[in-house]
Amino acid sequence: MLSAEARAAVAAARAAADRDARRARRAADRTAVEAAAGLDALERLGLELREAVGRARAASRPAETTASEPRPSASAALAAVPATRRRPGRASMRSSGLGELFRATTAG
C-alpha cells in the first residue's frame, strides 16, 4: 500500500493536473469565442462588400435602351483585337492570373 506521504503527493499532483486542465479549457474557450466573433465580423464584412459591389455594378451599367440591341460581352470586345498587334515576347493578360481575377470580378 501507499504511505500517507505518497498519497498526499498523488493528491497534489492530481489537483495540479486538474487546475492546469481547467486553465487550458478556459483559454481554449476564450480563443473559440474570439475566433467566432472574428468569423462573424468577416461574414458581415463579406456581405457588406458584396452589396457594395452589386450597387456599384448596377450604378455603372448603362441604361438599356431597347431589348432588341444585344449587349456586347467583354470576350467579344477582346476577340475584336487583331492578333498581329501583340509583340511576341510580351505576356498576355488573357493567359495571366490577373486576367482571370479581372474576369471573375467583372462578371455580372
Image: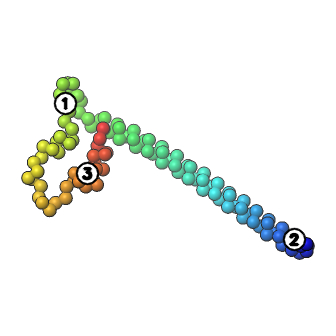
Picture quarter containing residue 90? bottom left
Q: Is residue 27 above or below residue 44?
A: below
Q: Nearer the viewer, residue 16 or 42?
A: 16
The residues tagged by marks 1 and 3 sit, at their Cα atoms, a distance apart of: 24 Å
Q: Is residue 74 above or below residue 16?
A: above
Residue at image x 8%, y 52%?
84
Picture quarter containing residue 59? top left
**Label number found at residue 14:** none
**Residue 95: where, in percent of width, then height?**
23, 54
Q: Which residue in the protein does label 3 denote?
A: 99
Q: Which residue in the protein does label 1 denote?
A: 70
Label 3: few (<14), some (14–19) or many (≥20) C-alpha neighbours in 10 Å: few
Residue at image x 52%, y 49%?
39
For marks 3 and 2, the one nearer the N-term is 2
Looking at the image, is mark 3 or mark 2 nearer the viewer? 2
Q: Inspect the image, locate mark 3, and give the three-letter code of the amino acid beneath it.
A: Gly
Q: Nearer the viewer, residue 58 or 103?
A: 103
Q: Quadrant of the N terminus?
A: bottom right
Q: Inspect the image, locate mark 1, and give the three-letter code of the amino acid beneath it.
A: Pro
